[in-house]
Each structure stands twice: as C-alpha cells, then as structure tokens.
Image (spheres, helix red, strand yellow):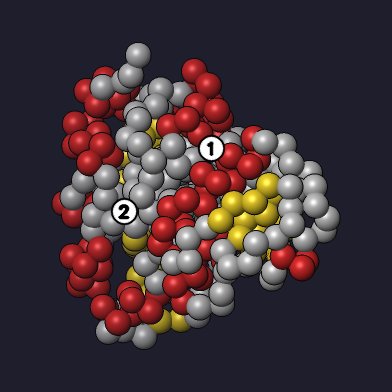
Amino acid sequence: MSLSIKEAAEIIRSGGLVAFPTETVYGLGANALDRAAVQKIFEMKGRPETSPLIVHVASVEMARQVVAEWPPLAEELARQWWPGPLTIVLRKQDSCPVNVTAGLPTVGVRMPNHPVALALIEEAGVPIAAPSANRFTGLSPTTAEHVRAAFGDAVPVLDGGPCTVGIESTVVAIEGDKLKLLRPGMISLGEIERAAAQGAEAPHPAPGMHEKHYSPRTRLILVRSASELPDRTGAYVWRVALGPAARSVRMPLDAAPYAAQLYRVLHQLDAENWPWIAVEMPPDAPDWTAIRDRLSRAAGR
Ligand code: AMP
Ligand code: MG
C-alpha cells in the first residue's frame, strides 16, 4: 500500500520520519522545528551528530523562518535556482534546533524541485530537515526501492520515481558579500559566481564531510582507462572505452544524464556482488566536478 501525501504530512507533524523524493536524491525527513523528531533521523541513519542536515522549504518565506538573515545575495540565488539543487547556508535563527545544524551557528536551506517534496512540505506546514535516506556512509538512494532496501518497513516512503538530478545538491555559504563552496553539485560554483557577480573563495571541505562517503559495499576503484582494470572478474562502468571486465555498463557522455544514473548503476552493481567495481574517471572539467567528487569519496580517497 502506498502512502499519500496527506498521511506523510501527518506523520511529519506528529514527530515521525518519512522518506520522500527530491530531484537530487531521496531524503529522510522530519519536522525541522522539532528537536526530538530530528534526533530520530540521526538514530535511523547511524549518522554522527557532527553532520548538519539540510532544511527543505516550500518557499522563501519558509526559509526565512529558520535563518537569522536573508541578504540580497540569498534572494538572488533563490530567484535563480529555487526550486532546484542549491543549498544556501546562512546564520541560523534561535528557534532552529541545534541538532539540525550539528551545533553550528549556520543552517543550510533548500527548496527542492520536485512536486511530491513541495506538496509534502506545504501540507505539513513546517520546514523538513532531511539528509539522504541511506545508512551513514552508504550510497545515496535515487529510487524508493533503494530506500526500502536500506530501511525496510522502519521508514514509510513516498514514491516519486527515479531522481532526475541524481546527486546531492551544491552547498554554498553566504558570509557577508562572499560565497563559499562547501560541497560541489550539478550547479557549478562558476555558474553561481557569474549569477551573483561576486568573488568567491576556493572550495573547502564542509563540516561533517567525511572522506569515505557515498560508498557501495563492493570495493570501488577509479581507473583512467580499461587498461587499468585489475583483471576480468569485476564490473566496469565506462564512458569512452569498453573494457574486458565480466560485466560492463556504458554511461552517457554528458555530465547531467551521467549524474542522473550514477547511483542507480552503483546500487545495481553493488547488489550483484562483484569482487570489485571499476569506474572510468570522467574528465577534469567543470561540468564533472561534483561527479568526480562523489566518485572519489565512494572510492575512499
Ligand atoms: P546530506 O543531507 O547527507 O546530503 O548532507 C547534508 C550536507 O549539507 C552536509 O554534509 C554538509 O555538507 C552540508 N550542510 C548542511 N548544513 C550545513 C551547514 N550549516 N554548514 C555547512 N554545511 C552544511
Ligand atoms: Mg548523505
């Protein structure tokens, strides 16, 4: 039996957890204003409390309920990219529980571009704190099936089909009139900078970003070409050169469709129990920055 948006919203309002689709990945959501509800997210995921959550909103007005300031730069970024895969980090309001932000004085807010997510947030009437709906360090889910595989019946899931962006949002902090990239995503820092017409600092790691993250259980190795495959026994995810592996998956040549499929392919290969999964590293070009980031983390380097 599938869950309706009304039922899911009722669960959120009464302090429970619901997994829901967004355009990036599926989220494990709780009422962002309810500290006890948010605590359940950390427990369910096995996520360390040092890792902040993103607060999902259905409007700029709702975002302004959790932040202490809404500078013109935030307004500009929201106007350009919301709803969309861009998280904006700003000083938090006191009413925002400390566990949402892992004790940080800032909070990340985002308006997702998915009709089911927006309907859920609107119906619940509260902002929804949500990390990806997977166990800590595991691969992020891009289908309802992936969420069920991770949590079984412990978490009700709203099914909104496969995620169209497929990797986690770009995270930028606004500090005064400066932008700082905290996590690359499919919206590049270059695009954001051009839009904001502002200087920005070089990428630096976000608090709570762990080296090994977004990982399959199977050993994942990054190769430059098929000639670097260890042997013929594993699975090879390639773009441009077919390899001699036992199993081989051809990926799109463009970054956006590649990202949309990446986690689904890795979940699938992980479930097939190959001795290793080799991925041909995509080019060192701006379009591919976020994908290269996630692949490096998945490979544990
Ligand atoms: P996840 O929801 O699993 O994709 O993780 C949320 C990520 O958003 C964190 O790991 C951080 O990279 C980033 N993030 C959320 N809130 C903040 C914040 N207040 N300051 C810095 N980074 C944040
Ligand atoms: Mg995650």
Nearest to N terminus: mark 1 or mark 2: 2
- Pinpoint residue 202: horizontal percent, then vertical percent: 50, 80
Q: Quadrant of residue 287?
A: bottom left
Q: Is residue 164 visible?
A: yes
> Could you classify mark 2 by the number of other residues whose Cα lies within 10 Å: few (under 14), some (14-19), or many (20 or more)?
many
Tell which residue pokes out farthest to the top in this image: 1
Q: Is residue 207 visible?
A: no
Say which residue appears at 62% left-offset and 55% top-offset. 237
Q: Say which element carries label 2.
A: strand
Say which residue appears at 48% left-offset and 37% top-offset. 133
- Pinpoint residue 29: horizontal percent, then vertical percent: 39, 35
| Camera-side residue of 246 and 32 | 246
Q: Which mark is residue 28?
A: none
Compared with residue 135, is residue 101 higher up or lower down, i.e. above or below? below
Mark 2 Cβ and ligand 1 under 8 Å apart: no
Q: Is residue 50 left or right of residue 130?
A: right
| Camera-side residue of 65 and 282 | 282
At label 1, the amino acid type is: Asn
- Pinpoint residue 186: horizontal percent, then vertical percent: 40, 64
- Pinpoint residue 175: horizontal percent, then vertical percent: 37, 73
Mark 1 Cβ and ligand 2 under 8 Å apart: yes
Q: Calculate the distance from the C-alpha at mark 1 to the C-alpha at mark 2.
A: 19 Å
Q: Which residue is mark 1?
A: 134
At label 2, the amino acid type is: Arg
| Camera-side residue of 95 and 264 | 264
Q: Which residue is mark 2?
A: 110
| Camera-side residue of 236 and 168 | 236
Q: Which quadrant of the figure contains the N terminus?
A: top left
Say which residue appears at 80% left-offset and 47% top-offset. 233
